[in-house]
Amino acid sequence: MAFILTSKNRLIHVSSWTVFILYFLVSYFLLWWDNMPLHVLPYEPLIGALSITTCCYLIYSTLQFYLPKERQYLKITLICLVLTTLSVGLTYFIINQLFDDFSNNHFYEVLPYRFVINFLLLLCVIIINIFWNIQEEYEANKKRKEESERILRDAELYNLRQQLQPHFLFNSLNSIIALIACKPEEAKNMTFQLSDFLRGTMRKDDKQLIPLADEITHLKLYLDIEKVRFGHRLTTTFSVQEDAMQTQLPPMIIQPLLENAIKFGLYNVIGDVEITVDIELKNHLLYISITNPFDNDQFESNKGTGFGLSGINRRLFLLYSRTDLLETSIKNNIFTSTIKIPQYD
């Protein structure tokens, strides 16, 4: 706000004194031209220039925040006429009080021209002032709108992130309860792992982007918990390109995909299941692909349930304003989800 006010004050002073200099030079030249070869004094042009400059400052001070409504052109014209009369009257009063008949006579001769010129000049100053006010109002409204949109976007992002955990948390707690009776040591370990996982989640709440290495560490905590639940049946393989380790991505953006992969790859499926995570950097895009096998009948029966992919799509849109950053494909009972995260220098 301080920058805007400083700029406006600068405009006021520069434009007012520009008017003063130009008005004085033009008036003095015309006075000299009309009275050659007589020697003319600069008093009359100087007083006229000071009068018009005073009216300019009056315009800026009285109309500093004025924004005309529709069809208020008459009001603007009347303001300009009053100020024009003031500038001409002030000039006449000073000349009449301080100077000789020659100056008074010349002033009367050019009075109609002076009035018209003053009117047009002050009208231009008023229009410039109004346009400046309109621009300031537009910028202020734009800033308020952007701030409101940012607050709403952050609130929605926070809400989306909070929806990622509940059913995983409930499943983990149910697994801990089931393990307490038969495998108390594993239940104890799983409780510690769940505590570390939730603590890491809370630390990420105030961050829009985190390093890929932190996200992978967090994912491995999550997978350790799931491996306690599913035992030897669950195998996960990470393949990460070395260059990709320097990238950043939204926190917990991969976990919902892993949850989906475990859900469709392990639930109601007999036998061991391998889930692979491939991460690479290409053309300033971080590609994260997760593949898992699935049973067709089980996949169809669960299709469209849960938060999953729609939440990820929404988060990516809010962060990057793009709808093409999440893709899925199915081939030979292998389901692949791919996220693309733009990387900006």
Image (tube, helix red, strand yellow):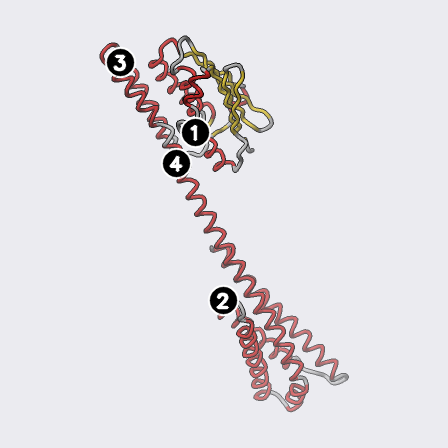
Are the residues tagged 3 and 1 within 8 Å (C-beta)? no
Mark 1, secondary structure of its residue? loop
Position of 127 compared to 110: left or right?
left
Mark 2, secondary structure of its residue? loop
State how far apart marks 2 and 3 are (Cα): 73 Å
Q: What amino acid does circle 2 point to? A: Tyr
**Image depth: mark 2 or mark 3 in front:** 3
Are the residues tagged 3 and 4 within 8 Å (C-beta)? no
Q: What amino acid does circle 1 point to? A: Pro
State how far apart marks 3 and 1 are (Cα): 30 Å
Q: What amino acid does circle 4 point to? A: Tyr
State how far apart marks 1 and 4 are (Cα): 11 Å
Residue tagged by mark 2?
Answer: 66
Q: What is the x, y in percent for residue 45?
A: 64, 79
Mark 3, secondary structure of its residue? helix
Q: What amino acid does circle 3 point to? A: Leu
Earlier sequence position, callout 4 versus callout 2: 2
**Image depth: mark 3 or mark 4 in front:** 3
Q: Is 278 located above or below residue 53 in the figure? A: above
Report crowding for label 4: few under 14, some 14 to 19, many 20 or more residues within 10 A (C-alpha).
Answer: some
**Image depth: mark 4 or mark 2 in front:** 4
Earlier sequence position, callout 3 versus callout 1: 3
Residue tagged by mark 3?
Answer: 179
Earlier sequence position, callout 2 versus callout 1: 2
Query: Residue 43 bears which disc, if any?
Result: none
State how far apart marks 2 and 1 are (Cα): 48 Å
Query: Residue 158 bears which disc, if any?
Result: 4
Q: Which of 28 and 189 is in front in this view?
A: 189
Report crowding for label 1: few under 14, some 14 to 19, many 20 or more residues within 10 A (C-alpha).
Answer: many
Q: What is the x, y in percent for residue 314?
A: 46, 34
Residue tagged by mark 1?
Answer: 251
